[in-house]
Image (cartoon, helix red, strand yellow):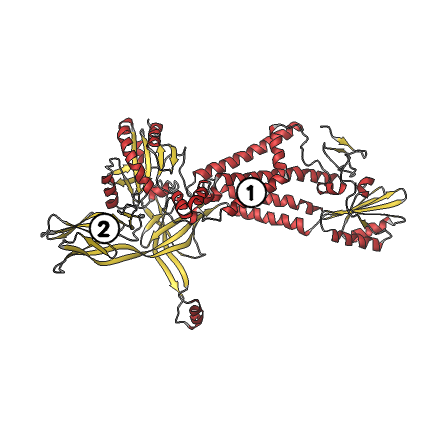
């Protein structure tokens, strides 16, 4: 009888703790109705980059992908760009690629920006926001780390320090 | 931890203060009347061996804890209304910076603590979860013993139990059948045992509190499910007239839905019409009659890759008005907002300043400008810089607020046979700045605009759960508030007849019942005690 009570109480508490925990976990990952978070497989996408080349995420299987969503008018995005460029040069040969998806801007603006910061990584142009919506991007910059198997390892909407970028690169290095 | 056996023979769980069967106080210092709320049952098992689980359980079993949780939640919700929630701040701004710049340090603290998105902040969900836990545990700890106590109660009650009731009397020579008949006429359920009577009415009202708690739990479960994938979508979709856009949240293996905005319609009440004339002049202006989007729904083929050119198949046409959503699958699109006359294309002419002679016209698509426009005969214009929403930033540099073409500005390079090396000019709305010795200028030659519609994309699989919870809650409240549990005991005691009565609320109603009873029979009117004397 007493043992039953302990079992019942423990089971009920466990169920409720799990339910509340899962709710909080989901709420933290949520940006909008659809969202891609840690552990999900990164949805494939196809975009044309600033140089007119076709970029498809699946082609990067086997490499780590530092997937960044940004805009020229967004100050925190601008701040992290030089760091990204510097680390890109270091990690490019170690199998980490940067894809800096521009959210719905014109080639003129983005080209000027890329020239100013001498950016050499591909900048896929998401003119219609299709990819931005598919990834449930709210605020920018948002960075999503995709490992060599196409799984999302981390997702953040902070403006990144160079140190943070290095630790991210290390995380997804194949 | 052994159970307590009362002198009447009933075995009660440890911690019981009034015998479940006969109502005899089982411990000293028991106040009968105040123990009646839960029938003197052992509602809180504080005395059980305190394992960790028991301690957590007992914490949440406390009504005090539950009340504090409610108070904290209310205060947090109130604080959440001081500054606007994140949903209502302008899109495309960094929330952290926005709250600090608009509301100062307090705004920053507000943001850092998560008050800007209260219902999504982890600690608010945790508080609600704890309230849910408290409701469940407190109800189980009280409801089940109460149910057992009311179920096992006997007709014959202990003398002390009778004497301590708020309404009590002693009489002689009373016709029991008469009492029974009278009570039954008042629609009491009467039981008889050894010449004693027990009449009760409205026992189900005691379950009201537990029914409304079940409703609350269902309600909270529904709210919780909104955070589960696939249960709830609440998004906004902006579409320009004549354009198609993918509908957020609608991607699946079967494809992705797209919506085309064929036309956005804004109608005003007609001022000329007699019927509306006076009403309209009293509000001093235009009053909208209709906001409407005419749309077409499309779907891609299976396994559509985001960003790829969609192969669209038309699903259906529709009209969306306020409160008349457009529905498909489990989604509904609601008319929420609009923007009239957003700049779409701007035209310029290359003009020689001295002569006013024009050398061709170019039209710039503000969402996708070309870098170079060849006007023929050696005339050419290049766009060096483009600021869709021009502003001078803090360093007095031209820049853009965001990517919306609300205040477009350009740096043009103009090439001509006369000036083959090119001349630069900064051109914006009512701005045309050059170094002063330019021979050519870009003169404004017209603008095209487009209307936009904004639709709320909503999918909600939780609404029926929330509604069900609300209905059950209201049933419970009604059950507990509009009915009450009235009990009357009649006991033969050494030639006397003892009568006692109790109700959980509405003593006035109970008193009228016993008054009626003593008027119809020989029963001494029941007297009210001032308080529960020991």
Q: Would residue B284 be seen by someone viewing this image from the given angle?
A: yes
Q: Where is residue B533 in the image (x, y as percent from the top left)?
A: 79, 43
Residue A4 in the figure: left or right of residue A64: right
Residue position for label 1: B72
Q: What is the secondary structure assignment of the residue under circle 1?
A: helix
Chain of the residue on which disc 2 is drawn? B
Q: Position of residue B426 (x, y in %)?
A: 21, 51
Q: Quadrant of the N terminus of chain B?
A: top right
Mark number, residue B3: none
Instruction: Name the foreground residue: B251 vs B423.
Output: B423
Residue position for label 2: B410
Q: Where is residue B88 in the image (x, y as percent from the top left)?
A: 42, 49
Q: Residues within 10 Å of mark 2 (few under 14, many from 20)?
A: many
Instruction: Name the foreground residue: B392 vs A158.
Output: B392
Write down the quadrant of residue B445 in the picture: bottom left
Residue plotted at (41% across, 34% down): A38
Residue A108 against residue B453 in the figure, above or below: above
Q: Residues within 10 Å of mark 1 (few under 14, many from 20)?
A: some
Instruction: Name the foreground residue: B173 vs B331.
Output: B173
């Amino acid at each position: 009888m007493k043992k039953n009570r302990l079992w019942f109480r423990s089971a009920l508490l466990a169920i409720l703790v799990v339910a509340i925990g899962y709710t909080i976990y989901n709420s933290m990952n949520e940006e909008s109705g659809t969202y891609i978070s840690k552990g999900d497989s990164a949805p494939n996408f196809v975009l044309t980059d600033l140089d007119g080349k076709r970029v498809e995420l699946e082609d990067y299987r086997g490499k780590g992908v530092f997937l960044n969503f940004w805009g020229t008018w967004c100050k925190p995005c601008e701040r992290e760009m030089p760091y990204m460029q510097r680390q890109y040069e270091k990690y490019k040969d170690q199998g980490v690629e940067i894809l800096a998806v521009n959210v719905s801007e014109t080639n003129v603006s983005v080209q000027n920006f890329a020239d100013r910061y001498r950016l050499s990584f591909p900048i896929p142009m998401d003119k219609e926001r299709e990819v931005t919506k598919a990834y449930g991007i709210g605020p920018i910059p948002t960075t999503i780390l995709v490992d060599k198997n196409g799984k999302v390892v981390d997702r953040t909407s902070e403006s990144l320090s160079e140190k943070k970028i290095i630790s991210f690169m290390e995380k997804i290095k194949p | 931890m052994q159970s307590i056996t009362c002198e009447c023979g009933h075995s009660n769980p440890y911690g019981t203060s009034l015998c479940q069967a006969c109502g005899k106080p089982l411990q000293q210092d028991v106040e009968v009347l105040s123990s009646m709320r839960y029938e003197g049952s052992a509602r809180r098992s504080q005395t059980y061996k305190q394992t960790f689980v028991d301690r957590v359980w007992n914490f949440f079993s406390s009504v005090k804890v539950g009340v504090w949780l409610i108070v904290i939640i209310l205060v947090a919700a109130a604080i959440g209304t001081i500054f606007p929630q994140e949903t209502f701040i302008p899109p495309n701004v960094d929330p952290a910076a926005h709250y600090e710049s608009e509301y100062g340090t307090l705004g920053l603290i507000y943001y850092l603590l998560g008050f800007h998105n209260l219902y999504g902040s982890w600690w608010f969900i945790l508080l609600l979860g704890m309230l849910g836990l408290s409701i469940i545990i407190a109800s189980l700890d009280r409801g089940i013993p109460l149910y057992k106590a009311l179920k096992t109660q006997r007709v014959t009650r202990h003398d002390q139990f009778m004497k301590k009731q708020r309404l009590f009397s002693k009489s002689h020579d009373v016709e029991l059948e008469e009492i029974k008949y009278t009570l039954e006429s008042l629609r009491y359920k009467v039981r008889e045992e050894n010449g004693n009577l027990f009449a009760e009415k409205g026992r189900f009202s005691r379950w009201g509190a537990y029914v409304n708690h079940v409703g609350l739990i269902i309600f909270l479960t529904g709210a919780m499910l909104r955070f589960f994938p696939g249960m709830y979508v609440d998004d906004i979709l902006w579409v320009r007239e004549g354009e198609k856009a993918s509908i957020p949240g609608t991607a699946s293996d079967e494809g992705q839905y797209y919506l085309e905005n064929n036309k956005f319609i804004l109608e005003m009440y007609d001022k000329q019409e007699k019927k509306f004339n006076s009403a309209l002049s009293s509000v001093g202006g235009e009053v909208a009659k209709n906001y409407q989007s005419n749309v077409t729904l499309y779907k891609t083929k299976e396994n559509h890759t985001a960003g790829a050119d969609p192969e669209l198949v038309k699903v259906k046409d529709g009209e969306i008005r306020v409160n008349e959503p457009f529905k498909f699958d489990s989604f509904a699109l609601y008319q929420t907002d609009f923007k009239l006359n957003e700049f779409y294309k701007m035209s310029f002419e290359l003009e020689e300043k001295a002569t006013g002679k024009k050398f061709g016209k170019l039209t710039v698509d503000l969402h996708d400008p070309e870098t170079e426009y060849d006007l023929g005969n050696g005339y050419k214009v290049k766009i060096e810089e483009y600021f869709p929403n021009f502003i001078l930033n803090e360093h007095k540099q031209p820049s853009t607020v965001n990517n919306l073409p609300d205040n477009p500005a350009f740096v043009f390079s103009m090439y001509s046979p006369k000036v083959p090396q090119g001349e630069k000019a900064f051109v914006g709305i009512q701005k045309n700045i050059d170094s002063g010795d330019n021979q050519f200028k870009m003169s404004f030659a017209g603008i095209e605009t487009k209307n936009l519609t904004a639709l709320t994309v909503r999918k909600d699989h939780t609404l029926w759960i929330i509604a069900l919870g609300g209905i059950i809650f209201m049933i419970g409240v009604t059950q507990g508030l509009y009915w009450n549990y009235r009990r009357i005991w009649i006991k033969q005691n050494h030639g006397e007849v003892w009568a006692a009565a109790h109700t959980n609320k509405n003593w006035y109603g109970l008193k009228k019942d016993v008054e009626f009873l003593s008027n119809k029979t020989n029963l001494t009117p029941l007297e009210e005690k001032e308080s529960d004397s020991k």
